[in-house]
Amino acid sequence: MNLKYEGKTKNVYKLPNHQVLLKFKDDVTGENGVFDPGANTVGLTIEGAGKSGLRMTKHFFEVLAQKGVETHYVSADLDEVSMVVKEAQTFGKGLEVICRFRAVGSFFRRYGAYVTEGQALNSFVEVTIKDDERCDPTISDDALDILGILTKEEYVILKNKTKEICHIIKDELASKGLDLYDIKLEFGRDAVTKEIILIDEISGGNMRVYKQGTYLPPLDLEKEFLG
């Protein structure tokens, strides 16, 4: 296979017919050996994290497909810990879209003077630029438009798709008594149709989920949710 890109938590290989293969790793983001879905660096390696992330991702992408939501997902192979997806073009050098249902993580660190930890945020959508050197700064729709990364019309589409997808994920988790506090998604343009679609993964490594007020780390979340 032709290695296209080596990422923090996945390697990306080019396939024919505008498809790529994502090979999941056991590396997770964090700092000082502590997992943090919002971190810019690989903080630790957890055995089984790759397969756990893929199991969650496969489940959620298949749920979204059933509900008619367009994504890059084609198929997944749990034994090979890999996923085949449609090729997609990123916005600029990449954007991350965070949907926040409660004030935790970096949101609480930034705005702690105005909110209490865990305060409800009504599915607030926040966009950051993927830029490790500058710690993934947040960016507004005006700035995205000025910089030629995303038009204001595209930003509205991105925001609406984020809310729709995240409410589906939140409801799925709630069916097992789990509470989604925040989640990080990525979007891109389908390489063929140019439609804005959900890309990357949907796993415990991209979200903060609590059970009866107690945070569940990614592997514990997967076991609790999928059994």
Image: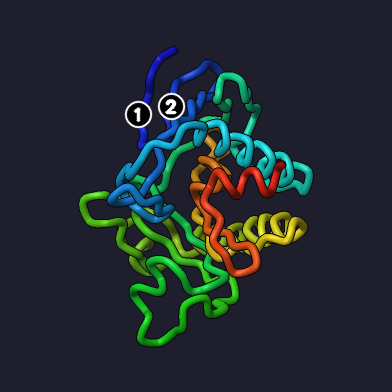
- Up-down: is 21 above or below 217? above
Q: On screen, 90 above or below 111? A: above
Q: Disc 1 marks which amino acid? A: Glu
**Residue 103 vs residue 142, the one in the foreground:** 103
Residue 165 in the image, given as x and y percentages of width and height: 65, 55
Task: Name the residue carrying label 1.
Answer: 6
- What residue appears at the point 51 percent right and 42 percent down from the top-left corner? 189
Figure colour scheme: rainbow
Residue 117: mark in rendering = none
Name which quarter of the figure residue 1 lies in. Answer: top left
Q: Are marks 2 and 1 in contact (CB under 8 Å)?
A: yes
Classify mark 2: residues with Cα within 10 Å, few (<14), some (14-19) or many (20+).
many
Could you say where residue 126 lies in the image, as x and y percent from the top left?
Answer: 45, 66
Element at badge 2? strand
Residue at x 59%, y 69% (from the top left corner): 213
Q: Is residue 36 left or right of residue 192?
A: left
**Is disc 1 surrounded by few (<14), some (14 to 19) or many (20+) residues within 10 Å?**
few
What is the spatial separation of the Cα atoms under label 2 and label 1, in whole angstroms? 6 Å
| Image quadrant occupied by the C terminus | top right
> What residue is rendered at 56% in x and 31% in y?
51
Q: Residue furthest top?
A: 1
Look at label 2 and name its amino acid: Val
| Residue matched to label 2 | 12
Vertical placement of residue 41 versus 58, above or below? below
Could you say whether the residue bearing mark 1 is in a helix, strand or loop?
strand
Q: Residue at x 42, y 62 (%)?
A: 127
Which comes sooner in the sequence, label 2 or label 1? 1
- Residue 112, horizontal then vertical, whole percent: 37, 81
Left or right: where 25 falls relative to 82:
left
